[in-house]
Image (cartoon, rainbow, N blue to C red):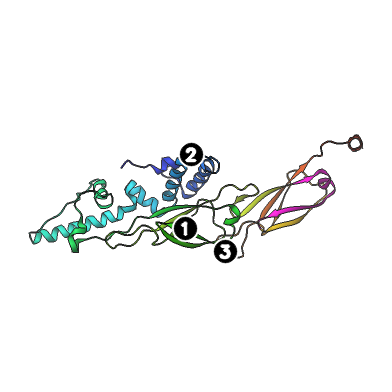
Amino acid sequence: MAYIDYYKILGVDKNATQDDIKKVYRKQARKLHPDLNPNDKEAERKFKELNEANEVLSNPENRTKYDKYGENWKHGEEYEKAQQQQRQYQSQNQSYGGYSGADFGEGEDFSDFFQSMFGGGGGYSRSSRGSASGKFKGQDVQAELTLNLRDAAKTHPQTFDINGKKVRITIPAGVYDGQQIKLKGHGNPGVNGGPNGDLYITFSIPADPDFERIGDDLKTKVAIDLYTAVLGGDVKVHTLDGGVNLKVKPETQNGVTVRLKGKGFPVYKKEGQFGDLFVTYEVKLPVNLTDKQKELFEQLKNS
């Protein structure tokens, strides 16, 4: 098996922090997302590789295993346990003149072991040795769930079909793009009666046309006409839970931003807590003016 350099795929240094990994992943995921690259097989392939790399490197435990065992990170600990059990079994059989079995020497490449234990190879299998049989955890399963921003803002049930089994979970409001959760025991079956692997679900939340999410806050823009900007008035602003009327102060300048407290995104697993919504005014100049209107503007200009 060729070495898979997840750091290279993600485009980060091996010393990158978890925040660095999160930021780079989000940027690359938006660029390669299938919704933005329809029918682009190369972008689809790179997107899958990117998610695979993120699923490993964004999880500190998995990252540590990957740094130690490389592409065999999922079964690195099983290898060490099997090696220890094999030596014990070998020692016992040598004492009684029995079969000593295969020896995994210090510094030996993991590949032969993984090929025989997990790749279906024809090497010596300790599972045929009765009491010497080792129990191994099943492989973890990686899955991706795409949610739009509004779905991510509400707690709701979701059903997955994993290996022919229906898995039902409740997604808490406030999940973020790139966030990963673990469902213990919902991965592939264990080996020789070992425990099942785990299911890792990574959330993908594409950019929303109306709102930009920054942590638990949201940003949006609203257009107001010149007359409202100059004289003041009301404007309707859309939020995630409906529209609200906002008072526009007289002589409001283009680009002015106001804050609507508590109208942002729900805080993850903190019921009743929300970020803020920041609304930026975009003043639209009138077009197709009549001669009379132009004359009035000239009067204002010269007054």
In the image, which is nearer the foreground, mark 2 or mark 1? 1
The magenta stretch spans residue 226: yes
Report how many numbered discs are placed on residues in the image. Answer: 3
For label 2, the crowd category at 10 Å Cα-Cα, with few meaning under 14, some 14 to 19 and many 20 or more, is some
What residue span does the magenta drawing correspond to? 223-240
Residue closer to the observer: 112 or 119: 119
On the image, the x and y values in percent for residue 211 come to 64, 49
Dot 2 or dot 1: first in sequence order is: 2
Q: Secondary structure at mark 1?
A: strand
The residue drawn where x is 40% and y is 43% is 6
Mark sitting on residue 160 = 1
Q: Which residue is mark 3?
A: 270
Quarter of the figure with the N terminus: top left
Q: What whole-number distance in Å separates the C-alpha atoms at marks 1 and 3?
A: 25 Å
Mark 3–mark 2 distance (CA, rounded to whole Å): 36 Å
Is residue 122 placed above or below 43 in the rendered structure? below
Disc on the earlier residue, 3 or 2: 2
What's the amino acid at mark 2?
A: Ala
Q: Residues within 10 Å of mark 3 (few under 14, many from 20)?
A: few
In the rendered image, is residue 130 in sight?
A: yes
Q: Which residue is pictured at 85% across the width and 48% down the height?
A: 231
Is 235 in the magenta? Answer: yes
Gap in Å between the C-alphas at discs 2 and 1?
A: 25 Å
Q: Amino acid at mark 3?
A: Lys
